[in-house]
């Protein structure tokens, strides 16, 4: 059966028209067929998947489940009890957590079936899923190109029909950018909307658990199950969880959309610009009002992000020292030698680079000049959004300045790689929600995503706008390469 629509799968399993085991078998067949080429998954345990599906088949006899039998892929930086969780790093290569992340536990309580753990940039540090210690994931629309990152494996799993829904994580665009590159929908929620308990920490003031799917409607279904306060995470919000499905039924006519002029300057690919400008006109034809707005501190965003995120990473990753769990070098001479060799060989080049940047920014004599000042700039970026949302309901922009680039194209140029996040990092710095929705293809058949940014806790409004847009203007996708 076609497993791409979460509502179709859920309703069929609840009605007894198909079993959760049959759905799981279909997902596993597709993984076996495609993943040898795409390299989206790091861990798949078929017996565990089928046992879980059998459990759901027994449970639905007692009543319907919100996500009955829906196959979900989980990024490999979210803890799954007893199932290998590596963060795509050698330092956690064989680690099996003793507990589930809250988001994973809530999905399973709703009846979802976790089909596997997906590849990512090591510790979620990257924009291409090339920084994995184990493999490079490939874009299903062009096998020579990256799928985006760091949640590239989750994006490919959904785009290639190996899972219906996926969980990724967002620190600076790690769900919206791969969603854009793979022609699916990806939502970065408001900071605190979904519990981070069990998400392996990268930058704690920026990290979000974030859903991916083939439609905003499916994401609304997933979000309704995982959002909400969690006693295990003091940063999770007590804000009530709305009825996202009901929100989708409201009209978009009259919504005011802002076009941030700073997002349409130098460096924006001509085909991406044309697709986004067409998308803006399409939104206007739905009855939305369009106005130009300014986010004047946007030029400082990349520099600001790449001080704050590495600084917090430097602190969070200090726990991987070879003492308590994870990788440890053989036969160290002494404690210092064990620390040095474990961390230098256990971490990849990009992770080591960010730890060193962050340690420098936090060091004595430099804290105020770097991290302290960066936090002040972050406040200014947040203020830009507050002022913009006094005038408009949402912002419209590109997700990335270019379509998916070729594997290896930017590997030797970290700054060029970092600049691919220019349109996404501000939402993480400001803590506001954003969604990427498909809006077209380049002449070479590469997907382009349209980004919608909204007020805090207005995920429902963004998903409503995104679904209305797709209902009217869904692009015709070329065939996948596998």
Image (cartoon, helix red, strand yellow):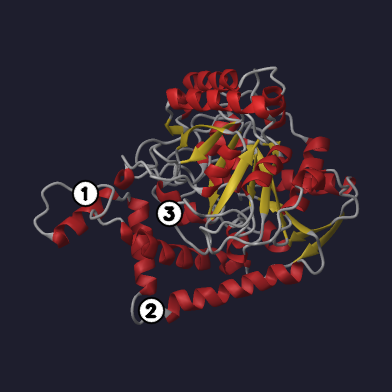
Residue positioned most to the front:
62
Q: Position of residue 207 (x, y in %)?
A: 52, 57
Separation of marks 3 and 1 at Cα, in angstroms: 28 Å
Q: Nearer the viewer, residue 60 or 476?
A: 60
Q: Which residue is mark 2?
A: 366
Mark 3, residue position: 414
State the quadrant of the C terminus: top right
In-front residue for pair 473/415 = 473
SS category of the residue bearing label 1: loop
Q: What residue is at 67 percent from the left and 33 percent from the top? A: 65
Compared with residue 390, is residue 69 higher up or lower down, i.e. above or below? Answer: above
Within-10-Å neighbours for mark 2: few <14, some 14–19, many 20+: few
Between discs 2 and 1, the one toward the N terminus? 1
Residue 341 position within the rendered picture, expressed as x and y whole percent measured from the top left: 19, 54
Q: Disc 2 to disc 3, how far (Cα)?
A: 23 Å
Comparing labels 3 and 1, the label whose residue is closer to the camera: 1
Q: What SS does tag 2 mark?
A: loop
Q: Position of residue 424 (x, y in %)?
A: 60, 55
Residue 328 shows which numbered tag? 1
Residue 10 image label: none
Looking at the image, residue 398 sits to the left or right of residue 173; the answer is right
Identify the image quadrant of the N terminus: top right
- Reading the chain from its start, which is encountered first: label 2 or label 3? 2
Give the mark nearer the N terminus: 3 vs 1.
1
Residue 183 location (% of width, % of height): 64, 36
Q: Nearer the viewer, mark 2 or mark 3?
A: 2
**Cα distance in 3D space between marks 2 and 1:** 31 Å
Q: Residue at x 54, y 56 (%)?
A: 172
């Amino acid at each position: 059966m076609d497993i791409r629509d979460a509502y179709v799968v859920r309703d069929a399993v609840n009605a007894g028209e198909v079993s959760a085991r049959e759905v799981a078998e279909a997902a596993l067949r597709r993984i076996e067929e495609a993943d040898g080429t795409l390299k989206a998954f790091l861990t798949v345990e078929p017996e565990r998947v089928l046992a879980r599906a059998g459990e759901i088949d027994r449970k639905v006899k007692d009543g319907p489940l919100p996500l009955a039998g829906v196959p979900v892929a989980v990024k490999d930086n979210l803890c799954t009890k007893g199932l290998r969780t590596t963060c795509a790093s050698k330092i956690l290569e064989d680690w099996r957590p003793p507990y589930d992340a809250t988001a994973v536990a809530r999905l399973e309580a709703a009846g979802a079936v976790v089909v596997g753990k997906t590849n990512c940039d090591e510790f979620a540090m990257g924009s291409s899923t090339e920084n994995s210690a184990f493999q490079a994931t490939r874009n299903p629309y062009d096998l020579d190109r990256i799928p985006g990152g760091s949640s590239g494996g989750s994006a490919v799993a959904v785009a290639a029909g190996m899972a219906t829904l996926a969980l990724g994580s967002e620190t600076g665009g790690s769900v919206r950018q791969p969603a854009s590159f793979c022609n699916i929908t990806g939502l970065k929620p408001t900071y605190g909307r979904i519990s981070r308990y069990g998400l392996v920490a990268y930058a704690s003031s920026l990290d979000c658990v974030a859903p991916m799917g083939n439609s905003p409607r499916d994401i609304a279904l997933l979000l309704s199950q995982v959002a909400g306060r969690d006693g295990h995470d003091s940063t999770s919000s007590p804000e009530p969880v709305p009825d996202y499905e009901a929100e989708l039924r409201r009209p978009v006519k009259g919504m005011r959309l802002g076009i941030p002029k700073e997002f349409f300057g130098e460096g924006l690919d001509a085909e991406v610009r044309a697709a986004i400008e067409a998308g803006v006109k399409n939104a206007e034809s739905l009855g939305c009002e369009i106005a130009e707005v300014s986010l004047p501190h946007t030029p400082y965003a990349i520099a600001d992000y790449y001080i704050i995120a590495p600084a917090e990473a430097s602190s969070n990753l200090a726990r991987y020292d070879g003492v308590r769990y994870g990788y440890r070098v053989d036969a160290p001479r002494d404690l210092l030698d064990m620390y040095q060799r474990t961390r230098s060989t256990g971490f990849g080049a990009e992770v080591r680079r960010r730890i060193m940047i962050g340690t420098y920014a936090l060091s004595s004599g430099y804290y105020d000049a770097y991290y302290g000042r960066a936090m002040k700039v972050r406040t200014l970026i947040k203020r830009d959004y507050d002022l913009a949302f006094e005038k408009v309901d949402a912002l419209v922009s590109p997700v990335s300045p270019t379509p998916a680039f070729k594997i290896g194209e930017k590997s030797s140029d970290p700054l060029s790689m970092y600049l691919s996040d220019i349109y996404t990092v501000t939402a993480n710095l400001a803590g506001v929600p954003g969604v990427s929705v498909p809006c077209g293809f380049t002449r070479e058949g590469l997907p382009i995503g349209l980004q919608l940014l909204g007020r805090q806790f207005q995920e429902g409004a963004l998903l409503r706008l995104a679904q209305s847009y797709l209902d009217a203007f869904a692009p015709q996708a070329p065939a996948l390469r596998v």
